[in-house]
């Protein structure tokens, strides 16, 4: 085990506890408030709209970081989180307080609630996402992350909550927590071994308006190319528009989905041609737990088929594709690249 890996393991237990605190606090807030209150806009950020429910996780995150490794320079870290890591004049927050950013040992990127739209209306689980990487300054990237933790924030009517984590090179691990009995069970992450998307779930994200028709056209072109036209009265495959990047990764690593792609950043020219601005896109903090999916066997690339990478920040737009296994990638990736090139969107 490398020196960096040995040091980063010190983050694991505290982060698991932090995730549990945030999960429980958000569930308690949902129990005590009406959905309309939690859905109120709290503030606007460059990368996203922050709702009242998001503030619950943010407050706990800051309080936790104030006490985490309070005196430990060995575990000093730069916090990257929407609305928090940008202090006065965009200065990042470094812990322990007073530590110089350049001398901090790690960078910790967090999305306290990924999927807030779904959870605040009690439609779908949300996720707490955290990635830890050695500090290489502003150029620290997703590929540098050596520890990731992801925890489910369940619906009120749901008593089970899944939690996953991974240390680079040591596989993915998961537990299922019973909120009623407080019992924990080991959970095996098993991406689909199917060799085709036929009769399975596969999709391209198109859950915000503006260019949904173009994204749907790409989706149709890929599915038709892979499976041919539908037979009367039959469904060749299905889709599930999960409005959470962490949730999409979970669906891939748990065997529920076989292919997922989020191409929204590529649609900028399409939107501009319609006199529109590009809307909400995926950002690095949404993908900070991609290490867990990769350690579980999921193949995740950028839109061109190269290894996924991006600087750890809250603003850059990222396009990505995820495949449950190499056979699915062989079936879908050439069709995806062809569809993008035909529209002048690929390389």
Image (spheres, rainbow, N blue to C red):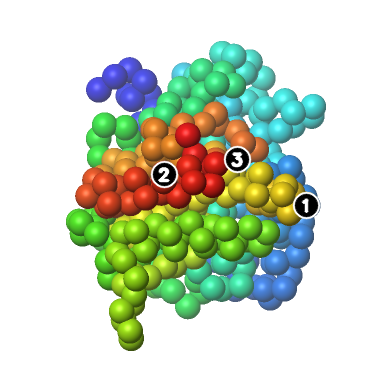
SS under mark 2: helix
The spot of residue 322 in percent (x, y) is 38, 48
Give the foreground label among 2 and 3: 2
Q: Residue at x 31, y 72 (%)?
A: 236
Q: Which residue is mark 3?
A: 317
Mark identifier at residue 275: 1
- Horizontally, residue 278 falls left or right of residue 28, namely right
Q: Residue at x 56, y 13 (%)?
A: 103
Give me the C-alpha separation between circle 2 and circle 3.
19 Å
Q: Name the N-terminal-most of marks 1 and 2.
A: 1
Q: Residue furthest top?
A: 103
The quadrant where residue 182 appears? bottom left
Q: Name the N-terminal-most of marks 2 and 3.
A: 3
The spot of residue 167 in percent (x, y) is 32, 35
- Horizontally, residue 203 falls left or right of residue 91, namely left
Q: Residue furthest bottom?
A: 233
Give me the C-alpha separation between circle 1 and circle 2.
26 Å
Q: Residues within 10 Å of mark 2 (few under 14, many from 20)?
A: some
The spot of residue 150 in percent (x, y) is 43, 49
Q: Residue at x 34, y 71 (%)?
A: 229
Relative to residue 112, is residue 194 depicted above or below? Answer: below
SS under mark 1: loop
Relative to residue 11, is residue 332 depicted above or below? Answer: below
């Amino acid at each position: 085990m490398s020196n960096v890996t040995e040091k980063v393991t010190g983050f694991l237990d505290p982060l698991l506890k932090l995730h549990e605190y945030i999960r429980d606090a958000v569930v308690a807030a949902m129990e005590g408030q009406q959905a309309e209150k939690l859905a109120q806009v709290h503030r606007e950020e460059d990368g996203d709209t922050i709702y009242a429910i998001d503030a619950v996780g943010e407050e706990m995150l800051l309080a936790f970081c104030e006490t985490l490794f309070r005196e430990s320079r060995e575990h000093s870290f730069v916090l990257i989180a929407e609305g928090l890591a940008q202090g006065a004049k965009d200065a990042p927050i470094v812990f322990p307080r007073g530590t110089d950013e350049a001398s901090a040992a790690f960078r910790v990127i967090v999305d306290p609630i990924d999927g807030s739209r779904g959870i605040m209306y009690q439609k779908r689980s949300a996720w707490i996402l955290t990635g830890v990487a050695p500090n290489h300054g502003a150029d620290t990237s997703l590929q540098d992350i050596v520890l990731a933790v992801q925890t489910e924030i369940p619906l009120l009517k749901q008593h089970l909550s899944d939690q996953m984590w991974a240390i680079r090179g040591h596989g993915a691990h998961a537990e299922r927590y019973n909120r009623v009995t407080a019992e924990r069970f080991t959970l095996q992450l098993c991406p689909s071994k199917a060799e085709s998307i036929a009769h399975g779930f596969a999709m391209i994200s198109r859950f915000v308006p503006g260019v949904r028709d173009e994204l749907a056209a790409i989706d149709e072109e890929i599915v038709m190319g892979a499976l041919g036209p539908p037979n009367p009265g039959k469904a060749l495959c299905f889709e599930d528009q999960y409005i959470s990047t962490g949730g999409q990764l979970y669906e891939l690593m748990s065997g529920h989905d076989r292919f997922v792609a989020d191409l929204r950043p590529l649609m900028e020219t399409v939107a501009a041609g319609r006199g529109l601005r590009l809307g909400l896109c995926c950002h690095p903090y949404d993908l900070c737990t991609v290490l867990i999916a990769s350690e579980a066997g999921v193949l995740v690339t950028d839109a061109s088929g190269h290894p996924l990478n991006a600087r750890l920040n809250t603003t850059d737009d990222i396009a990505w594709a995820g495949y449950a296994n190499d056979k699915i990638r062989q079936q879908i990736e050439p069709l995806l690249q062809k569809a993008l090139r035909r529209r002048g969107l690929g390389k």
